[in-house]
Image: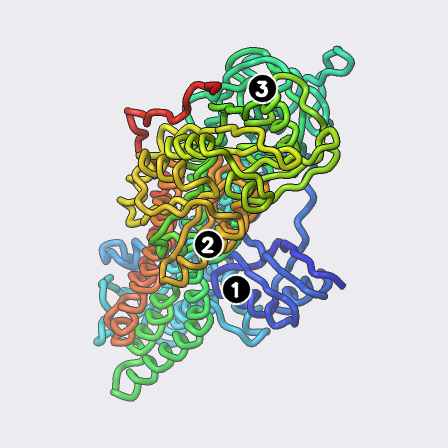
Amino acid sequence: MSTVDVDLEISGMTCASCATRIERKLNKIPGVEATVNYATEKARVHADGVETAQLIAAVESAGYSATLPAPVIDEFTTAATPPDDVELVSLRRRLLISTALAVPVALMSMIPVLQFTYWQWLALTLTAPVAVWGAWPFHRAAFVNARHGAATMDTLISVGVIAAFGWSLYALFFGMAGMPGMHMTFTLFGSPEAGSGEIYLEVAALVTVFILAGRYAEARAKKSSSEALRALLELGAKDATRLVGGVEQRVPVAQLAVGDRVLVRPGEKIPSDGLVVDGASAIDASMLTGESVPVEVTVGSRVVGATVNVGGRLIVEITRVGADTELARMQRLMDDAQTGKARVQRLADRVSAVFVPIVILLAIVAFVGWMLVGGSVEVAFTAAVATLIIACPCALGLATPTALLVGTGRGSQLGILIRGPQVLEQTRQVDTIVLDKTGTITQGAMTVTTVSAAPGVTDDELLRIAAGAEWGSEHPVARAIASAHGGAAPVAESFASHAGFGVQAVLEGSLVVAGRPEWVQDQWSVHLPIRFRGEAEVLEAAGGTVIAVARDGDFLGIVAVSDTVKPTSADAIARFRALGLRPVLLTGDNAGAAEHIAGLVGIDEVRAGVTPAGKLDAIRQLQSSGRVVAMVGDGVNDAAALAAADLGIAMGGGTDAAIAASDVTIASGDLLVVADAIRLSRRTLGTIKGNLFWAFAYNIAAIPIAMLGLLNPLVAAAAMALSSVFVVTNSLRLRRFRPAPAPTVPTAPVAREPQHV
């Protein structure tokens, strides 16, 4: 057997305690790590050597049902509107009918002038369907739980409704409540002097209605949990114009394959991820990145599916399709975020698992206590029922999921993809943010600015040899040199890259090395002439990256490459400081270039000349000194550091390795969005904590009042139902999150015009 990750769709859950029971049942299986989300009704299971059938059997043994998700045809390009939720429709019907029957009961019970002769029997007739049929989901769940030796929040509700209805039957048939002319007066607090003629039909009816209303709000919240994902899927194009032998063919996007060329006219969506092979245009990527300004693209530019061509005609060669696309990756990240649980929610789940039995015990204590001190049965009963109802933390199961659903959904609209709820807690603790230079603070579009050849070597020959040596490297500096030579560069017979230092290649039978001057000198014993050493120092001090080139031990010259600072980088650094974060520049570039860039954007702490392995060591050094570190990067050489950081943030335009190692992905390349991501994460975590506080605080505070017989069960039911409404509405406030406005004055670029010395 192998290790598998599987998602199970769970049905039958009615509260957070149900999710906790299922999670505990699954985690008892050796080799299984499971997380059950009540809001999304999914179980995320990591199983080592365990069959899926065994997992489903474990869920069923707990009294619930589990199935594998049904396959979705063309999942990433088709977003059909889901059919009406049968459960939601049934719950709405049950709520409406119960409300129509309960309202007259409530009015008659609370307004003495409406209490005509034998009104109580009409109230009984109206209440019976509500207490039996309306509350049936609670009774059924309580029975299932009891059969498995467990008690959940449904148990509290069911026992409370049955107790109120049962006592009323006793009072009507065996007490004085059935007598003609019986009158009642509603009070907010229990009445210790209540006589034997009291009935609680309005309690049984209204408690049921209140709880059904809360459950309906929960069901609506759960139904909307997939809205953000569905909105993402709807962004994708449905068909495309494929070019076959110069002939246009209109085909569904699902039929596209890697290597196909598609025609994208102005106003059409890019059908899938690809490279522009012909044409120039502007691309509106706001749906994916949140950026309002279109991005200029030309031949060689990378484009992402679902973005809109707003300019000229483009021919795009498809590089990714289906589940490999950027859109699909975003969908998976959001799904992961919405399925997981934060540590604070796990603590709440453990508390709720023992909370219900304790509440039942407290209700018994209240009843027995009143009887022992000489109170009436009516008072003892009121105290017990109110304790059961007020203590039910039904909102607990929605506290974290609804905030996550709304927060991650809002993040997706802004181009912020949060991998999981644990990320939210990490953003609260982070005090240091480490930033890669190339592609993060700078544009990552390196250009050759200086070509200085040794005597006897022409500039063109130097650039030709350097381009041939660097052709096999993916580093931005290497790509800049490789593309700077207009003619055909020699093809390397062999190639080797030394991460952070340079490359070596066999060109035309000669060994060519290109890399840092220090590396060329120390590793290959090729010494730069004094003039070139001085020139290299000047170029590095001005922010350039200098590459020394040698062939068969002979120095050929130097090539300088420089980058451009992103217009928003300086403002982003200022916002990091305002958030309490200390910025650190970490780069493999030389100290002169790093210090120059750092000075432009306002970073004081710089660590330059760091290899990919050194980046990992630098992160660990900062952590060992007591700092909680966030790392922002975009390249393959950043992947290890991103994974080791307490919070890894990848720029969406970066490599797959960087994105896979990160906790947060920024769809755009704008560093300002990183600050927005931290703000959104912290606000979402604050919302979660507020929800959890309310879910527990009100009932814990009211339990002593209820046990003293001073709380009407109706008030308890209303408070309990309103807690679910509060949690949902409080979470929905995250929809109003707005990114900070962009700066009006851009930072001056660093790049200079190429010059030949």
Q: Nearer the viewer, residue 754 or 615?
A: 754
Q: Point out the frontmost of discs 3 and 1.
A: 3
Local crowd size for mark 3, using a 10 Å CA cut-off: few (<14), some (14–19), many (≥20): some
Instruction: Give the percent coordinates (x, y) of residue 375.
Output: 26, 83
Tell me which amino acid carries mark 3. Answer: Thr
Tell me which amino acid carries mark 1. Answer: Cys
Query: Quick one: label 3 or label 2, which is nearer the N terminus?
Result: 3
As measured in the structure, the alpha-carbon distance from the residue carrying label 2 to the one carrying label 1 is: 35 Å
**Quarter in which the N terminus is drawn:** bottom right
Tell me which amino acid carries mark 2. Answer: Ala
The residue carrying mark 1 is 18
Is 216 left or right of 657, judged from the image as shown? Answer: left
The residue at the far bottom in this view is 372
- Quadrant of the rendered image containing residue 279: top right
- Quadrant of the rendered image containing residue 550: top right
As measured in the structure, the alpha-carbon distance from the residue carrying label 3 to the one carrying label 2 is: 46 Å
Residues at discs 2 and 1 in contact (Cβ within 8 Å): no
As measured in the structure, the alpha-carbon distance from the residue carrying label 3 to the one carrying label 1 is: 77 Å
Instruction: Give the percent coordinates (x, y) of residue 756.
Output: 48, 19
Q: Secondary structure at mark 1?
A: helix
Q: Nearer the viewer, residue 488 or 153?
A: 488
Query: Quick one: label 3 or label 1, which is nearer the N terminus?
Result: 1
Q: Point out the frontmost of discs 2 and 1.
A: 2
Give the residue displayed 25% in from the left and 87% down from the top: 373
Give the residue displayed 33% in from the left and 47% down from the top: 605
